[in-house]
Amino acid sequence: MKRYALLTLILVSTALPVAGRAFDDNKKEEQQEKAKSKERVYNADFEKVWTACVQAANENFVMEHSEKESGILNFHSGTSLTSNGFRVGVTVIKLDDGRTKVVLNPQKKGQLFAWGAGGRIADKYFKAVNSKLEH
């Protein structure tokens, strides 16, 4: 009986670190996917993308600040059943090959869980930017 208990203890103690590493790897992949969902690269020049980004923020959210020279703008979202709202920083980056990269950084306003609201805000914002760029 002691052999079985010892064998079980050995198996469990070697399996836990392996399972923990697998969990950490999954968490890293999930974080990378979340980051990718909050950035886009457009085949358009900086001026056109900047204008679309500012218009999208003004029409769908509450604009707080924009500074074209640095490529930074900030807006915030309203509250909902699942969120106290977000402050969102947008960085518009001119790339060497004539393309422009847009990166969103949503930050929760005084809450622990957002239930995916940051991703929904990013989706809504990028849909608006895409619409502006198509016209």
Image (cartoon, rainbow, N blue to C red):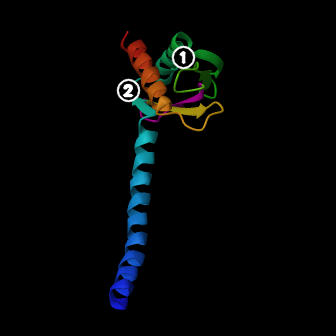
Q: Which residue is mark 2?
A: 43
Residue 102 placed where, x, y %? Answer: 49, 30
Give the class, few, some or many, for how many residues have Cα within 10 Å of label 1's Cα (few <14, many ≥20). many
Q: Which residue is mark 1?
A: 57
Residue 71 placed where, x, y %? Answer: 59, 27
Give, as a single range, the part of the protein colored magenta.
85-99
- List the single residue furthest toward the front: 1
Give the class, few, some or many, for how many residues have Cα within 10 Å of label 2's Cα (few <14, many ≥20). few
Give whichever of 84, 98 is nearer the camera. 84
Q: Is residue 102 visible?
A: no
Residue 99 placed where, x, y %? Answer: 42, 30
Does residue 57 sit above or below 5 in this rendering?
above
Q: Quadrant of the C terminus?
A: top left
Does residue 11 sit above or below 93 in this rendering?
below
Residue 28 placed where, x, y %? Answer: 44, 53
Residue 17 within the segment the image draws in magenta? no
* Dominant SS in magenta: strand
Question: Sequence-wise, which precedes: disc 2 or disc 1?
Answer: 2
Q: Quadrant of the N terminus?
A: bottom left
Left or right: where does residue 75 sit relative to residue 16? right
Give whichever of 49, 111 is nearer the camera. 111
Quarter of image, res 107:
top right
The amino acid marked with disc number 1 is Ala
